[in-house]
Amino acid sequence: MAGEFALIEHLLRQTRAHQSDHPPILGPGDDCALVDVTRPGLVWAVTTDMLVSGVHFLDNDDPHALGWKTLAVNLSDLAAMGAQPRYVTLAAAIPPVDASDTSWIDTFFSGFMACAQSFKVDLIGGDTTRGPRSFSVTAMGEVDPAKALRRSGARDGDDIWVSGSPGYAALGLGSKLGQWQLPEPVAILADYALHHPEPRVALGLALTDMAHSAIDISDGLLQDLGHIAVASQLQASLFVTSLPDCPMDVDPDHWQHCLLGGGDDYELLFTAPTSARERLQALSHSLALPLTRIGIMHVPKDNAHSTAQAGRIVDDVQVLDHHGHRIDLTLCRRGFDHFANS
Ligand code: ADP
Ligand code: MG
């Protein structure tokens, strides 16, 4: 493969067969792409996420799955806002070896485009440069600004809900890193959850009419719920008896650590009024996606509540046992923070 431009041309050839509902006015190839919102009254929701070799993935990870995940984590942010994904750009740093033998990057790109096709988004541009493998995606989606699901929207008395099966991706990561062994059926689900997250786009769109706030679980359930609590100036109480059960033959301590502190699930965590319970159960049925009610949002009940302060673990989220007593979470990692202890 000769040079940057030949490589870009080579990769973009794959996108030509791709059809979406709303192709851009002008796609890749010029200095900029040209895009328009498709309906009046909507605005762009815009998000960027980066995946860096050695931090977010390992060089021997399956490149197809990595390509899927690189786009999926960005679409997950749009889903958590209640936006309809439309357009994405991809900035890629790749080492010279990937430009001379394109098999790794081709497979990565086919995984990326599989996700793009699955969610009907167009790749409208990007950048390609030399460097240690890293990928940055910017994703744009359309949303009604009055209905966008902000972290700050939770209200006193809201139920807290979570989609799907949080905790499995972290189980899969620990198993991959040799921290524990999983029984066969759990190992398969956990590996899939880690490498093939499904952005909850249809759920996010439906929630714009039912939920008050939402976030996607990228850094751990407690930590991400903490973001909603702080932004909404409320406290979150989770009921241990309502949390998803420990899978059979998995160590309960490992499970608690993965469920509450593990990231990478990309499930949606959201709050909704109690009046929405029936509609949410019907939605769960129609999407064939479990939605589990795990707690409530409320005004802080005692002085232990403290607001966010840099570098401090705060008391914005508590987990209650079946007697309503607080469970000590100091042994449970609060979630992923790139700069913690650095
Ligand atoms: P410029 O010099 O204007 O930045 P480039 O030579 O970097 O243009 O890119 C040429 C065209 O190819 C642009 O339209 C750009 O958006 C597109 N492009 C480059 N790299 C990628 C990529 N990794 N994915 C998608 N489009 C890309
Ligand atoms: Mg460029």
Image (spheres, helix red, strand yellow):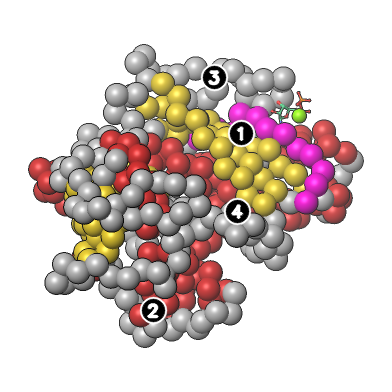
- Evaluate whether residue 194 shows in this view: yes
Q: CA distance from mark 2 to mark 4?
A: 25 Å
Q: Range of the magenta residues?
A: 121-132
Q: CA distance from mark 2 to mark 1?
A: 40 Å
* Three-letter amino acid code at the position of disc 4: Phe
- Please tell me whether mark 4 or mark 1 is closer to you in this view: 4
Discs 4, 1 touching: Cβ within 8 Å: no
Above/below status of 160 relative to 140? below
Task: Label 3, secondary structure: give it.
Answer: loop
Q: CA distance from mark 3 to mark 2?
A: 49 Å
Looking at the image, the residue that sits furthest to the right is 2
* Position of residue 43 measured from the top left corner of the image (x, y, whole percent): 41, 21
- Evaluate whether residue 265 shows in this view: no
Tell me the residue at 64%/57% (across/down). 342
Task: Label 4, secondary structure: give it.
Answer: loop
Name the quarter where the N terminus is drawn. Answer: top right
Task: Determine which residue is flagged by label 4.
Answer: 339
Residue 253, which numbered label? 2
| Left or right, 129 with reference to 180 | right
Task: Determine which residue is flagged by label 1.
Answer: 89
Residue 35, which numbered label? 3
Mark earlier in primary sequence (2, 1):
1
| Left or right, 42 with reference to 282 | right
* Three-letter amino acid code at the position of disc 3: Val
